[in-house]
Amino acid sequence: MKLLLDKQALVLLISIIWLLSACQSGTQERALTEFQGETMGTSYTVKIVALPAELKPERIGAEIAAILEKINGQMSTYLDDSELSLFNRSQETNWIDASQALAGVLQQAQHISAMTNGAFDVTVGPLVNLWGFGTSLGDNQVPSEQDIREASNRVGYTGLQVRSSPPTIRKSRPDLYVDLSAIAKGHAVDVVAEYLQALGIDNYMVEIGGEIQAKGRNPRGTWWRIAIEKPSTGSRSLHTIVELNGVGIATSGDYRNYFETEGRRYSHTIDPVSGRPVTHKLASVTVANPSTMQADAMATALMVLGPEAGYRFAEEHQLAAFFIVKSEDGFYDKATAAFGQYLASEGE
């Protein structure tokens, strides 16, 4: 089964924790309905608390799967007949009709690219593939300067144009390649959440490949509590806990997907401007936003910008962001002012 794989940024699995709720022991839990499956080269989980009796789980599960299949058919680079794959293969540079969904995601991507001066760029795929982190298997070799220049010539978000009415897209050069790995999962989370809300469901959690949106209360009656993973290459453990209600969250990091050669580590996070893996000390960054799609893309952008420039950018734009930075003594973290509202109080 061909699915949309995450090729542009490692999106860390943000563990969902149930036993860290602040409610008293012995509190009766409300009924939980759960749906799981595979999509976009990863897994998804949807949890609904106190599902109304008139809503049948079988119907909801089937419709969630259908929603995700449709999005995959629009935005996958691994499905040969997806809308995006057909656009990528096309050698035309004229306007091409697009679905409203694809055009909308591309518009958001272009907006974030402009905001970040290209730190986020959905056309970075040729460089990701060249460094061995994309569709082709890497050989853990550093590309030549000539190969990097040639791949960089194909990269640049300004080479992509999008119109919303009617929804159409075009590229300035025939070999422009668009990859939505760093934004499509967040979009899919938002679409599933909107579907649940349209059904009148107010207490839910939607997770796709680590991108999460949560609303209302969990089975124990408290806000949904999410653990951000400690960025270590060994065992997995939590670093801090956040509480969510009506907000999406996404994390990007550099510590699980990399290769080493001649004593140097090369991160899978590629800077679209330099054409090379980032070399800064930012281990991971988590972004919270009412739009999970925005959180998804911004986490990638901040990961490219790094701990200093990324933090300045996040503060200037009032982004809710949490940075975990490598140091000689381990890790230290810093949160923007807007992120403080999501941090769970100690002792809860």
Image: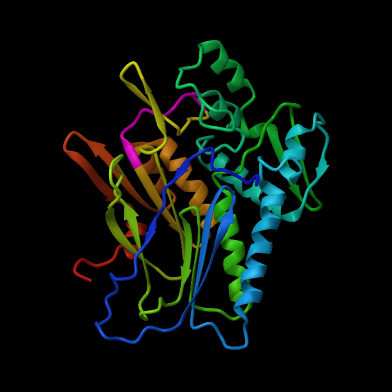
**54 vs 268: above or below:** below
Does the rendering let one see residue 283?
yes
Q: Residue 322 at what x, y percent from top left?
A: 34, 51
Residue 77, percent from left and from top = 66, 40
Nearer to us in this view, 316 or 332: 332
Task: Magenta stretch: give its range.
Answer: 273-283
**Residue occupying image coordinates x 19% and y 69%:** 347
Q: Is residue 98 left or right of residue 203?
A: right
Q: Say how the picture is coloured.
A: rainbow
Q: Which residue is found at the position 37% from the left and 46% from the top? A: 285
Query: Which is more toward the observer, 182 or 73?
Result: 73
Residue 95 drawn above or below residue 237: above
Q: Is residue 246 visible?
A: no
Q: Residue at x 67, y 51 (%)?
A: 72
- Determine if the magenta segment contains residue 230: no
Toward which corner of the image does residue 84 lie, by quadrant? top right
Query: Total label count?
Result: 0
In this view, 227 is above or below 216: above
Quarter of the image where one finds residue 195 = bottom right
The prevailing secondary structure element of the residues shown in magenta is loop
